[in-house]
Image (tube, helix red, strand yellow):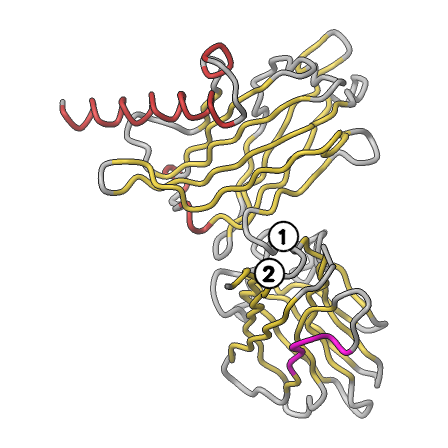
Amino acid sequence: MRTRKRALAALAGAVALAGSLLGVGSAAAEALEEHFCDPGARQDILLTFKTGADDLRGDNWLGDSNLAITVVLRNKPAFRIENVNRGKNWGGGEVSPVRICLDSHGVVADEVSGLRLEVVNDPFGVFDNWNMDRVQAVTRSFTLGAFQTVSSVDLSGAPLHRFDGNYPTWDLQVEDLFNGGFEFDRPLNGDPRPPVSSPWFTEGPDWKGVDVGLNNMLTGRNNAFVFSTSSNWNAILQTVPVSPNAHYELTGWLRTSDKVNTGFFGARLAGTWPPPGEVHFGPIKKDYVQLTSVFRTTTQTQATVFAGLWGVGNGAEWIQVDEVKLRRIP
């Protein structure tokens, strides 16, 4: 009975916190939508959305337009929650709290890499455009008798993102780098080596992609690869937000084929060349090795993380990449 009372008290605290995250009163807190939650849930994500001038209509006479969220994990396959708003309208300027519990998926808060938000429309309806002006995501773990914050992200804009037919998805980075373990990726049309998925992108003419469940990974199920049969530069990259005048540490685990001798790992900053802290590698045979790049921003607000190689031009050479992480350091 005492355990249940503590769990219910913790749940009440989550509802109260949802009401206070964006400075709103109890009326919004009472609208908390919970997903995969029970009174004993100890790992969760507490989300708070603020709608802009254009609302999310939810189930309506024009068709169903509802919000889905894919929880992207560092070392495990992602999972998706449909109809996060449960068909309800989120009116213009309205604050809407949502709680996603992780326990039933065998996930702890520290494993969450990011969230992909997507508006899903009824195929026979009209797409409902809507503005998201603010979102806060707090991942939490219940330890020592209370919920402890593991990570917190709070972003706003006017709008922060407008969901429409051209831009139905938006990625919220819980970690500084999204999908650094490549676990979000799935086979495409039966191909276990699909292209890397957004926000990752590529450079160069040769083959790049993700090994899905092919036992080439360091952790989890997947890893990325770059495969070169030419003497060109080929790489996988991701552009991430950074703070000006700050120090960052970029880490990643890599291995290569035998003849790779001109591989590079690091982060590009606009107006600076070569990339500060860039790491030259190769060959790295058999076992994965962790590489670390440390760099400092000046006025930049974005950095482009990359891992790539110059092909040797006389055969097929490759690199495999996993567990890429970026974090701000003192």
Residue sitting at 48 percent across and 20 percent down? 33
Decide whether the magenta segment is chiefly helix, strand or loop: loop
Q: Secondary structure at mark 2?
A: strand
User: Please, what is the three-letter code of the amino acid marked with disc 1?
Assistant: Arg
Q: As displayed, is residue 236 above or below residue 61?
A: below
Task: Residue 80 in the image: state x and y as whole percent.
Answer: 56, 37
Q: Is residue 88 left or right of residue 27?
A: right
Q: Is residue 59 left or right of residue 107?
A: right
Circle nearer the N terminus (2, 1): 1
Residue sitting at 38 percent across and 26 percent down? 14
Label pair 2/1, CB-CB below 8 angstroms: yes
Q: Secondary structure at mark 1?
A: loop
Residue ID for mark 1: 186
Residue ID for mark 2: 212
Q: Quadrant of residue 160?
A: top right
| Magenta region, residue range | 274-279
